[in-house]
Amino acid sequence: MATPPLAQEIIPSNEAQFTADLAARLKAKIIRDNPTGIMRRDAHPKMHGLVKAEFIVEADLPPELKIGVFSEPKSYPAWIRFSNQDGSINPDKDRDIRGMAIKLMGVPGEKLLESDKNCQTHDFILISTSRFVTKNVEEFDQLIASVTGGLWAKIVFFLGHLRVAINLLRSMLKFANPLQIRYFSTTPYLLGESAVKYSAIPQLTKAYPIPDNPDHDYLRLAMVKQLQEGDAVFDFAVQLQTDAVAMPIEDPGVEWPEALSPFRKVATIRIFQQDFDTEAHKVFGENLSYTPWRALPEHRPLGGINRARRVVYETISAFRHEYNKVPRQEPTGWDI
């Protein structure tokens, strides 16, 4: 049997139908979940903090990594948003997936997202698990249908999709501090003509324990405390796809083995010592939009889940901003 090519997508014939269904289902969900007040995100609505950072590309990267935003040693100013994944605003002690959304500024070049093709920003979307919960858009649409349905719908779905249940249980964890979590893209992206996954790996100097009697928002309080004391630093790394079978493009529910291809550092993320716990930061972070498709073509998102994200993120973001009567615009600096 011939070896499958690397970095190759295979698009199911019914994917567009399930993507449209998913977008409609999630839009209906946020309308139902937010009967009063502002219209929040369908996922990651609870923000722990929006912080100022710099994204410093490594010098002397090898040619296979020296592509796109990594093509030259340069420091990009960035806004980074830390959050809980659950669509409801829950206590931080609850098991959940946590998010790290990175927005670089001052990135030249036309972007993939048609509505923002001339913007000077570039987004990376990471979460606190190395596996996505489902293998494709159809399965993800069915998952959302089950979790927004009754108890019997959930039982039937998970009994028929045991790997989804296992992936979900593995990913729903408790953490002490968003600045001390390792984050992953779970989904793949181009790096020139290769495919990669991303990871942000914290440089730990002092570990924070989960409090004995945690506050409802203790993850934000942990960030406040750490950034009062000094900077927080992450290594930003990429993992090259080297085996199309063991490291699939179209199934992000499979973790790419680091034994086959280790993560390689391409940049340093430095989150400055700062006071971010302000009303201005909260409002700005609520209105800020992130999508993996706000990216250079050299970093094009790959796979069905990412293709669905292009439609779903754009649909939800446009609806939220219109409903909240807030203009959707990309930042050009740290002024808010």
Image (cartoon, rainbow, N blue to C red):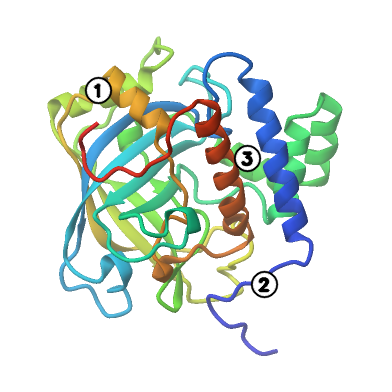
Is 78 or 27 nearer to us in this picture?
27
Q: At label 3, which amino acid type do we have?
A: Leu
Question: Which quadrant holds residue 87?
Answer: top right
Q: Are marks 1 and 3 in contact (CB under 8 Å)?
A: no
Is 122 or 197 nearer to us in this picture?
122
Distance from the alpha carbon under mark 3 to that under mark 2:
25 Å
Q: At label 1, which amino acid type do we have?
A: Val
Q: Dot 2 corresponds to which residue?
A: 10
**Pointer 3 local density, CA inside 10 Å: few below 14, some 14–19, many at least 20:** some
**Pointer 1 local density, CA inside 10 Å: few below 14, some 14–19, many at least 20:** some
Q: Dot 3 corresponds to which residue?
A: 168
Q: Is residue 69 visible?
A: yes
Give the position of the C terminus as an image quadrant.
top left
**Residue occupying the far bottom of the picture:** 2
Q: Are marks 1 and 2 in contact (CB under 8 Å)?
A: no
Query: How many numbered tags mark residues here?
Result: 3
Q: Dot 1 corresponds to which residue?
A: 224
For residue 326, side relative to residue 180 (left or right): right
Tell which tag, 1 or 2, sits nearer the viewer: 2
Q: Measuring from the top left, give residue 270's x and y in whole percent.
A: 19, 45
| N-term-proximal mark, 1 vs 3 | 3
Name above or below for residue 62 compared with residue 16.
Answer: below
Q: Measuring from the top left, give residue 267's x and y in whole percent.
A: 24, 58
Q: Secondary structure at mark 2?
A: loop
Distance from the alpha carbon under mark 1 to that under mark 3:
29 Å
Q: Measuring from the top left, give residue 166's x and y in whole percent.
A: 66, 43
Q: Are marks 3 and 2 in contact (CB under 8 Å)?
A: no
Q: At label 2, which amino acid type do we have?
A: Ile
- The mark found on residue 182 in the picture is none
Q: Secondary structure at mark 1?
A: helix
Distance from the alpha carbon under mark 1 to that under mark 2:
44 Å
